[in-house]
């Protein structure tokens, strides 16, 4: 992991902040660009805070990962509540047998992994505590 | 039927964990096998250009050294797991354009004793795009969603593994030549639910070469060429292109539609296919994305035995990537080689009956396993 890359990606690791296209309304999260990924409009983004709650769209349970991860580890594609956006996240405090499509989850700020002397914190999901 | 680009020869090596062979050794062996395969012989000096498909090497120079092909144009082509098929596609365009009369396509990959490796890197090196996003995960995400929407199951996926391992057991160049059962597939160690070990292709070393020629010189080399009919390529990402449903690969759909249009055929005309089965779920989705059946019906094709060697549309007679192995750059070229043999009637124990039109397909990953690249080629005898 290069230091410039680490710093460049700090905002998207530390904030639940995406970009909303003023032309088509698409919310890009977590990537930052000048061109809208959906409609192609140029420089039409405005920053938008995305929700920390969402619904599992699909998931897997990973059993084979590098040692920095604990397995079996549920991973999911989560559709965030309004204003919207979609995130891929790994889980915390989630039992593999509890995973299902449609389950409600929330994002929690945790250490993703520790590697080469660098702790990488960002958002993990866990079952929503209503 | 298009008769402007002919496949005139194909040669590969037995895929496997080839610790005794270097990348150069593998390329050299497959190149010599390819030259020898040309019915009426070929002088290497007649090769005017080459395309080299490999994912972990750089530049065409890597192909020139083991083949002795110096002072001709050699391009390195990389497009994820569609690397080999894209190299073939680009070579065919150049011959079709009339720029070259004879061209070589080589695909190769040395995976077994390469430090690091794609899967480990995908998991950790790139913080945001990578967080535990592995190759099996990328494909397995579609499996869970397909199960949910269409009622497919791990048992359906197991049937694909059983079929491909059976074919591989009959295919002399396959890395794995054993049979398996549904029960064994379901009880194999989990890799990424819903995929177990026997749902996955192996890490493989291998190389394969094919030779193509323009129509005006093809008969100098063979009386039974196989004609390239067209190709397609598409790329996509769920962050964010068309790929939002997680029940298939829109990149495959784009590639297939372009290829069918160029070939002037539809999916119904395909009689044999070598498709991307890096995981069993991929093959099930390929059936749908390539138009062999409707979306949501892929599992029924394997349940009904349509894609077995004796079925009405045999898929992956060579054992596919699951049994034959998946040396990234070589995989697509080896699929072309297999379709070439099938259409010529020289496919040995895995020969399917009376195939006239065949399809080859790869789907590869990109951008830290958030996107995909698909390539389709169509051949006809």
Image (spheres, rainbow, N blue to C red):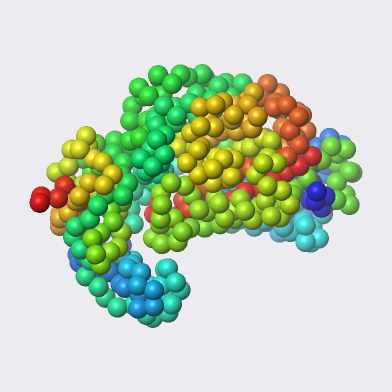
Left or right: B102, with B50 as reference point: right
Residue A8, located in which quarter of the rendered image? bottom left
Q: Position of residue B76 (x, y in %)?
A: 61, 55
Q: Position of residue B9 (x, y in %)?
A: 76, 39
For the point 48% across and 53% down, the residue is: B372
Residue B152, located in which quarter of the rendered image? top left
For the point 63% across and 26% down, the residue is: B311
Residue furthest out toward the left: A130
Whether residue B300 is visible, yes or no, is: yes
Q: Position of residue B85 (x, y in %)?
A: 62, 48
Quadrant assignment for the C terminus of chain B: top right
Whether residue B71 is visible, yes or no, is: no
Q: Relative to B362, does residue B232 appear above or below in the rendering?
A: below
Residue A17, located in which quarter of the rendered image? bottom left
Front residue of A25/A93: it is A25
- Total marks placed: 0
Front residue of A74/B206: it is A74
Left or right: B262, with A108 as reference point: right
Q: Position of residue A89 (x, y in %)?
A: 26, 52
Q: Relative to B98, does residue B326 appear above or below in the rendering?
A: above
Left or right: A31, with B208 as reference point: left
For the point 20% across and 66% down, the residue is: A15
Front residue of A15/B103: it is A15
């Amino acid at each position: 992991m290069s230091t410039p890359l680490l710093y460049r990606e700090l905002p998207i690791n530390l904030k639940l902040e995406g970009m909303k296209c003023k032309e088509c309304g698409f919310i890009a999260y977590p990537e930052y660009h000048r061109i809208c990924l959906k409609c192609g409009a140029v420089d039409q983004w405005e920053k938008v805070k995305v929700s920390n709650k969402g619904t599992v769209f699909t998931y897997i349970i990973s059993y084979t990962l590098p040692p920095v991860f604990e397995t079996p580890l549920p991973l999911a594609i989560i559709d965030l509540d309004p204003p919207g956006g979609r995130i891929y996240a790994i889980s915390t405090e989630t039992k593999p047998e509890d995973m299902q499509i449609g389950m409600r989850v929330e994002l929690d700020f945790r250490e993703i992994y520790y590697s080469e002397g660098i702790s990488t914190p960002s958002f993990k999901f866990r079952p929503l505590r209503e | 039927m298009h008769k402007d680009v002919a496949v005139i020869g194909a040669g590969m090596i037995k895929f496997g964990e080839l610790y005794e062979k270097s990348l150069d050794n593998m390329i050299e062996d497959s190149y010599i096998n390819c030259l020898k395969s040309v019915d009426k012989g070929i002088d290497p000096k007649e090769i005017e250009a080459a395309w080299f498909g490999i994912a972990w090497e750089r530049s065409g120079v890597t192909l020139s050294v083991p083949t002795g092909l110096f002072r001709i144009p050699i391009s390195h082509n990389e497009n994820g797991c569609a690397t080999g098929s894209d190299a073939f596609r680009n070579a065919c365009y150049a011959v079709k354009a009339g720029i070259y009369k004879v061209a070589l396509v080589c695909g190769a990959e040395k995976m077994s004793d390469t430090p690091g490796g794609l899967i480990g890197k995908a998991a950790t090196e790139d913080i945001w795009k990578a967080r535990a996003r592995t190759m099996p995960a990328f494909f397995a995400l579609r499996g869970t969603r397909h199960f949910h929407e269409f009622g497919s199951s791990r048992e359906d996926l197991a049937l694909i593994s059983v079929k491909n391992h059976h074919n591989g057991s009959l295919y002399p160049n396959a890395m794995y030549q054993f049979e398996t059962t549904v029960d064994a597939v379901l009880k194999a160690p989990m890799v990424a639910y819903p995929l177990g070990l026997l749902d996955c292709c192996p890490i493989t070393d291998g190389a394969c070469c094919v030779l193509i020629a323009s129509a005006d010189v093809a008969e100098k080399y063979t009386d039974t060429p196989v004609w390239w009919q067209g190709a397609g390529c598409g790329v996509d990402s769920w962050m964010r292109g068309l790929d939002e449903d997680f029940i298939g690969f829109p990149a495959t759909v784009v590639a297939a539609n372009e290829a069918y249009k160029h070939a002037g055929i539809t999916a119904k005309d395909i009689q044999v296919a070598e498709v991307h089965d890096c995981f069993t779920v991929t093959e099930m989705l390929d059936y749908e994305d390539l138009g062999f059946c409707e979306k949501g019906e892929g599992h029924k094709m394997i349940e009904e035995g349509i894609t077995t060697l004796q079925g009405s549309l045999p898929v992956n007679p060579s054992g596919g990537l699951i049994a034959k192995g998946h040396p990234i750059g070589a995989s697509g070229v080896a699929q072309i080689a297999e379709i070439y043999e099938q259409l010529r009637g020289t496919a040995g124990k895995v020969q399917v009956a009376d195939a006239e039109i065949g399809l080859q397909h790869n789907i590869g990953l990109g951008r830290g396993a958030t996107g995909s690249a698909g390539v389709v080629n169509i051949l006809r005898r």
